Amino acid sequence: MARVTAAGLAGRLGFSYDEVEDLRLAIDELCFGLTGPTGRHGTVELRYLMDEGSLVVEGLGHFLEDLAPIMLTEMSRVILSALVDEHDLASGPDGPLFRLIKRRHSNAALAGD
Amino acid sequence: MTERESLKETFAAYARTGDIVLRDQLVASHMGLAAYLARRFANRGQPLEDLTQVAALGLLKAVDRFDPGLQVEFSTYATTTIVGELKRYLRDKGWAVRAPRRMQELYLNLSQVVDGLGQELGRSPTIPELAAEVEASEEEVLEALEAGQAYRFASLDAPAPNGGDGEPVAESLGKEDEGLVRAEQRATLAPLLDQLTDRQREIVHLRFFRGLTQSEIAHSLGISQMQVSRLLARSVAQLRASAKDSGSQEDA
């Protein structure tokens, strides 16, 4: 659901297929980072913020159990750095949260205007 | 007697007698057509050998069902039957999780269109452009792309799509790369990457360490962008599973 919603919004912003695919992978990776390798009981609240040429996705975990410290693996960091412009995963006052920013770099939208 | 007349006579004799020897002759004389049609479908993620077998089965059905009294050439009739058999095979066998038929067909269509439109435009197409090209809504395109993650991955033994008689994709991949080795050593990620196939490592390296886009990787390796997309998704999932197995989350 998180992936499809992001892809739909990115499509509206004129992101290229390449960029949409990157976004889908990045959301997978950050959701995995949020829920951890063994998964967690609870819900994840997602917010999508659209700006001209960029999409921000924020995820806030509401989990039932106490959490081990949230952090990305080295591999996740490498992957996310290649996929999105900015990313962060941290423990916040209301729970663990992630944030990513994907900007449109292709000139597809301009070409389509 | 011309070859055409001879063929017609053989079909008439087979229809009359049901002689298996005649059927084998008819099948053997059209195997070239079956192999040709199988190659036409060789870039859709299934091994060519399997496709050739499916095409041969379609040919056998065509020989059995062909009515020599009809005013139609056997090759025309057989082509329709064989292509139908190949499409059914790709639709049914290519999916690890069954997606609605419309989505399966749309995904297979998109896998062709993404590359073709990309070449035509000189850049990666947008979702609205893809939707217009396949005459579907943007929502349907996104749904098909999501469903496509259930599509199985191309065999390493499948021939490269650019040229049916080219070397298998596996042969052209997995060559040692000093840059990759350095990157792996620096990040101590080699043990994780070692769990991937050569092709997966190559694609992971090009996308995440060298920063090539999916379409650039597809162009560079001579495979479709959809294949790159599926392989990347699969590789990342495997890397995650490795992290899960190890039960640890490293710090930098």
Image (tube, coloured by chain):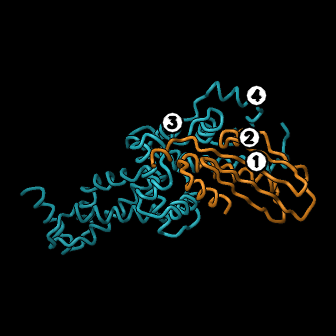
Chain colours: A orange, B cyan
In the rendering, which numbered label is found on residue B242?
1
Q: Which of the marked residues, 3 or 1, is nearer the chain's N terminus?
A: 3
Mark closer to the observer (4, 1): 4
Mark 2 and mark 3: Cα distance apart in space:
23 Å
Mark 4 and mark 1: Cα distance apart in space:
19 Å
In the rendering, which numbered label is found on residue B171?
3
Q: Which residue is nearer to you in this view: B200 or B135? A: B135
Where's residue B236, x and y in %? 68, 47
Q: Which residue is mark 4?
A: B186
Q: Which of the marked residues, 4 or 1, is nearer the chain's N terminus?
A: 4
- Indicate the amino acid at tag 4: Arg
The C terminus of chain B, quarter of image? top right
Q: Which residue is mark 2?
A: B192
- Chain of the residue where label 1 is placed in the rendered structure: B
Mark 4 and mark 3: Cα distance apart in space:
28 Å
Where's residue B116, x and y in %? 40, 47
In the rendering, which numbered label is found on residue A107?
none
Q: Which residue is nearer to you in this view: B16 or B60? A: B60
- Chain of the residue where label 3 is placed in the rendered structure: B
Same chain, marks 4 and 2?
yes
- Indicate the amino acid at tag 1: Ser
Q: Which of the marked residues, 2 or 1, is nearer the chain's N terminus?
A: 2
- Indicate the amino acid at tag 2: Leu
Mark 4 and mark 2: Cα distance apart in space:
13 Å
